Structures are given as structure tokens and as C-alpha cells.
Amino acid sequence: MRRYVLKRAVAYCRVSTKSKAQIHSLEYQTSYWQDKILSDSGYEYVGIYSDNGISGRSMNKRPQLLRMLDDAKANKFDVIFTKSIARFARNVEELLTVVRQLRDAGIQVFFEKEQIDTFDPNSELFLTVGASIAENDIKIYAENQTWANREKFSNGFITVGPQIYGYRMRNEDNTLVIVPEEAAVVKQIYQWYLDGDGMQTIANKLNALGIGNKEWHRAAISYILKNEKYKGCALMQKTFKVNGAQKKNAGQVKQYYMEQTHEPIISPEDFDRVQQLRIERAVESEFNQEMPRYPFTKKIRCGVCGSGFVHKIQNCNKPYHTEIWACTKKEAHGMDACCSTRIKDSVLKEKFIECYNEFVEKFPDSAETVQFKQQLAELLEQERELYAMKINRMIEVSDYNREWGELKTKIDKIYSEISNREVRGVSRTDLVYISEFDAEKVDKFLDYVTMYPKKVEFTFMNGAKISRYYSNGASGNKKGWLERKKERMKQEGK
């Protein structure tokens, strides 16, 4: 008679915090899996691995999970039970890598909530979909939050991002409070502009003086000079979302303009004078513009001497002309002034495509935004667990109400942080890979380009820097050039 061999089974449990409700949840999970495995005649109970008060963002920071994986390699059990994908891992790539390693070692993983068995050939597809559910939860919550924000705006509530230089938000009474040392810099920026300095000149001055403990760029100066909050007012809903895509509000939805919402740094008179100057200088610049504007115009700086790069055409009006970008200082004063190298326009565009696609893959969010979204996913999972405990009568109603209230406050605060960052950014629907050069991507995502000898570095709108070495190809005339020249002159009758 063939002897039936029991499968050796373990379970993995995790909770994100050490709150009372979460501790109850861990105890419940441990008891649940122990009873479930012991009551099944097909399994031999080996034990429980549980991480208490540890985030699911990274597997490397969960000691019990790592111990379980080591024990799996040592063949100490045959199957792992876990409540859900979210309990096991939130990173899809990390999840699939570990599941594949376990499956190759003959270890089966069963996710109860999603009813996924990793020995099923279709499990990877289901796992990928399941790991994306948390993001969908965030999306639904986002839609509700958008409606709530509009209600708040109509009642005089203002929101600002954490990076409005010169102010900090006092959350207790929703008031912007002046930061004196930063306000002094803002005043200086406005005064320099009124005195005739341009935005890039102002940025260069601040960098040369080492003011503000940051690197200043033209875009930051422009933001400060046109932001109505510096005169004590607030315009809400400058952008809006359509099917998840962020759009600039050009009158499609209602905006909310509120006056005297907080203490101004700049007087209304000086602010209005600056806006008039901005219009006049823009018109004058357009009137005097003789050279055509290219996608990288005014975006390239020399990493050697700090000058700008200018677009030039070599062998203009000839069939073999070449578009290049070159340092203005080197072009004017020669190699002794700067040792930077030229770059062909075609090569620059090719390198932009490579770096932009890497940006889409790795850096669509700032580190802060990624962290907030991970925290939000954790809190939403805690909310579901707390509700399950209430349904199963594992927690007193008073404790549930208190814990749920605390969770709700945290969720609202974190989503507000995410929303404040995204309102100044670009929707994920715009973050798509490209195979051909797209000037719109340069305008929308690229902050500036820094050119070094044979190296180009692209700095994107969230601060991510991605670089590539480049070559313009072999120098000198290509083989057969003389024959081609004679043939061309013959055709032209010369």
C-alpha cells in the first residue's frame, strides 16, 4: 500500500503598526492559520512566521519573512499560506522574483484572499493583477478626495504644496505662515526683477551668493514671480483631472480666487508691477526674436563654464549641412575659454529618447511622493483589517470607532500630501515610452540639460538626473565624398 505523505505547512502574517487594533489582527491571523492548518488532514503544521509593526514596502526589512525564505531553501516545509498579496509583498517585481524562487525550490504559496495558488500556470498573471489592486484603491479614494477638495475650496479652504518658498502651512487653522529668512530672499528676487534683471540672471546671482541652501534655476524664479500667494491671495484649482489625466484649467472648471487669505510677503502694488513687466518683456522678446526656437532652446547649459548652448547649422544651404549645439563662450572666445564639446542635434535627440524612457521606468514620482503612496496603501489595508475585525466581533465598538477615526485622519492627511504634489506635476497617463523624438515631452518633462565633454546629462521636472556618453561619429570626410561632389556639380551644371 502506498503511504500518503502530508505536506508540511507554514503561514506568514504581517501587520504594519503596533497599534492595539493591529496587535489584535496579528493574534487573530496567527490563531486562524494555526487552526486552519491543524484541522486539515492533508497538512502537517510546522509553524507561523509573523512580522509585527513592519511595513510591507520592502522584503529586506522583514526579519521573519527572510527567515522563512531561508528555511524554505533548507527544505523545512512544502507550502506557505498567507492572507493576501498585500501581506506578502507590495512590489510586483519583488513579489514575482520571490514566488519564482520558491516555486523552483518546490515550495507552493497560497494567497487566501485572492485564491491564487503559485503552482497554477496562470498564477503570475493573477499575482500581477492582485498587486495592482492597492493602486486602484488609491485611485477611487483620489476621486472622492477631488470632490471633497472642491467643496473645501468653495468654503474658503486653501491648499499649497510643501515647496512654496517663503511660507509654511500651519495645519491647525489652514493658514500660510511666513518664514522670515526665506521671505527676505523672495523680496530680493522681486526687487532685482523690478530693477531690470532677468530670471536667469537672478538665478545666477543667488547661486553665486550661495543664498537659500539650494541650487536656483530660471523655472524657480518664474514660479515665485507669478505666484499670487506672495501677495496674500490664493487661486485654487489651477489644474483639474479628466479620466485621470492632469489638465491645465483654462476655464473648463470653476476656479476659486480668494483675497487676503494670509500675510503677504510682497505688496499687491509690487506684485502687479512685476506681472506687467513680465508681459512687456515677453512681448519685447518675441518682437526681437530673429532665430527660430528649437525644442532645446534655452534649456542647455555648459557644465564646464556655465554658459548657455546655442543651435547652429554647419554648411548651411548645402545638402550635407549638420545641425549642432555648441557652447556660446567657446564659440565666441575659442578653446582656451572652454573645453566643452559640440553635440549634433540628432545625437542630442537620440540621447533624450534613451534618458526619457529610463525616467518613465524609474523616476515618475519624487521619492517623497512614492513614500506617501506606499504609506497610503498600508493605511488602506489597515482600514480593511479593522473593518474585518469589527464584522467578526473581535474588537469593541468604542475601540473600533477610535481606531477608525485615527486611521481616517492619517489617510486624509497623506492623500492631501499626494494631491498637493500631483497638482503641480503631470499625470501618469502622460508618462509613456517613446520610440521617436517628441518635442512635447521635452517641454513637459525636461527641466534642463547639462553638457560635459562627450557627456550629456538630462535633469527632469522632479529633479531626477540621467546621463549618457555620446559620440558625434567619425570626423572627416566619408569615403566616396569626392565622387559624390563631382556628380552633384555635374547635375548642377558646374
Image (cartoon, grey):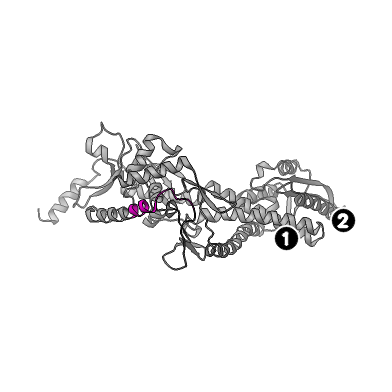
181 vs 257: above or below? above
State the image quarter where residue 200 is shown. top left
Q: Secondary structure at mark 2?
A: loop
446 vs 185: above or below? below
Three-letter amino acid code at disc 2? Ser
The disc, 2 or 1, on the residue closer to the chain's N-terminal end is 2
Q: Is residue 268 magenta?
A: yes
Local crowd at mark 2 within 10 Å, few (<14), some, or many (≥20)? few
Local crowd at mark 1 within 10 Å, few (<14), some, or many (≥20)? few
Label 2 to label 1: alpha-carbon separation: 19 Å
Q: Range of the magenta residues?
A: 262-275
Instruction: Count the numbered circles shown.
Output: 2
Q: Which residue is mark 1?
A: 115
Residue 108 falls left or right of residue 224: right
Residue 399 in the image: state x and y as whole percent.
78, 55
- The image quadrant where one finds the N terminus is bottom right
- Residue at image coords 70%, 60%: 114
Residue nearest the viewer, comparing 399 with 465: 399
Q: Which residue is mark 2?
A: 39
Residue 363 in the image: state x and y as whole percent.
50, 48
Q: Secondary structure at mark 1?
A: loop
Residue nearest the viewer, comparing 343 with 117: 343
Do tag 2 and tag 1 residues touch (Cβ < 8 Å)? no
Residue 271 in the image: state x and y as whole percent.
37, 52
Residue nearest the viewer, comparing 160 with 30: 160
Q: Is residue 171 magenta?
A: no
Three-letter amino acid code at disc 1? Gln
Residue nearest the viewer, comparing 93 with 273: 273
